[in-house]
Amino acid sequence: MENVERLQEISFEMAASQAHKVVFDDFILLNDNIDNDHPFVEEEEIISAKMMMPLKFMFTLVMICKEGSIRVCVNLMDMEVKANEALLITPGSIMEKVDFDPESKIMMMSFADDKDQETLSFAPASLRKYFLRPMVIRGSKRDIEEVENIYRLMHRTLEREHTEFTKEIILHYLQIMTCLFMEQKERFALEDNNKPSRKEEIVLDFIQEVHDHCYENRELKYYADRLCLTPSYLAHLISEVSGKHASQWIRDAVILEAKALLRSGNYTVQQVSFMLNFPNQSFFGKYFKAAVGVSPRQYLQSR
């Protein structure tokens, strides 16, 4: 039940008043405003959500923008989702900010963190890895209409009386939708000749590795080894492509994790220090203050 409580907590904070919210066990949550005139998120809900930031997602979130736009900062990267595009946020991702255009029309799906593996199980590894990190998926109006048709089928399935087959039906709908997103991603990349270069791919892989493993290690060599590169080459590549030193990416990821843990209200400063693999609370405090300008306790008090 931990997953469903977490799903509901975040959904209620970000879209508490929506009439179309449907939750099925700890499996999936659907929410939208495509048949309503009111905004997807009310102003007071945006304020409430921002007070919770940074917020770590322990489940998969997909936001499909039919009209308007969404602006977010996820894992230290700014992203804008426009009409006929979708935002994928993967488990473990940390959101620092989110803004919606008032007139946006959005469909949102949240599902438990093991379901992304099931929906991607059929896909080749070369494509599957793209869907295991946060990203924006471009589409056309027709693409989004196809996705919306699947979304509405899922919605109707969850509204009717549930049977022993309901979960399997929803899972297959999710697989169909994943196929549509994969097709869109490949088609638009080919049409625009916009596939990431090998260097850009390495940088994206590095950023994801850092966010997945900064709990364990803050050394550049650790990430270079995971990417089968030398530390000097990786450091040069990261600086060249991103304009930011690899050590900064690592530090910022650690600080983002620390802020999310502290803001959750579930852990003491000492516990956060231990969870982030610092030798002691004092060392963690100095590391945090050097990056943020205030101590962990002062950071909490200032929010």
Image (spheres, rainbow, N blue to C red):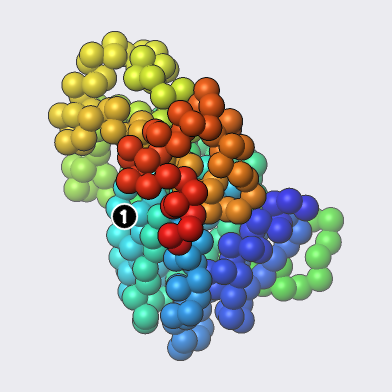
Q: From the viewer's perspective, is residue 64 above or below residue 188?
A: below
* Residue 291 at least partly seen: yes
Residue at the extreme bottom of the image, as rendered? 37
* 184, 60: nearer the viewer: 60
Q: Nearer the viewer, residue 14 or 121?
A: 14
In the picture, the quarter occupied by the C terminus is: bottom left
Q: Count the marks.
A: 1
- Whether residue 241 sits left or right of residue 32 in the image: it is left
Q: Position of residue 68 (x, y in %)?
A: 33, 74
> Where residue 248 appears, x then y in whole percent?
28, 33
Task: Tell me what residue is drawn at x 19 percent, y 21 percent.
Answer: 236
* Residue located beneath label 1 in the image: 79
Residue drawn at (77%, 53%), measured in percent from left and top?
Answer: 1
Query: Quarter-wise, where is residue 292 in the image?
Result: top left
Does residue 227 appear in the picture of this structure?
no
- Secondary structure type for disc 1: strand
Give the amino acid at mark 1. Met
User: What percent of the width, then of the height, locates residue 286?
Assistant: 40, 34
Q: Above or below — where is 10 with respect to 220?
A: below
State which quadrant residue 162 falls in.
bottom right
In the displayed structure image, the side of residue 112 where residue 218 appears, left or right = left
Q: Identify the residue at image location x=39%, y=33%.
A: 287
Question: In the displayed structure, does residue 243 sit left or right of residue 2?
Answer: left
**Front-lying residue, 10 or 40:** 10
Q: Position of residue 88 (x, y in %)?
A: 45, 52
Q: Label 1 crowding class (10 Å Cα cut-off): few <14, some 14-19, many 20+? A: some
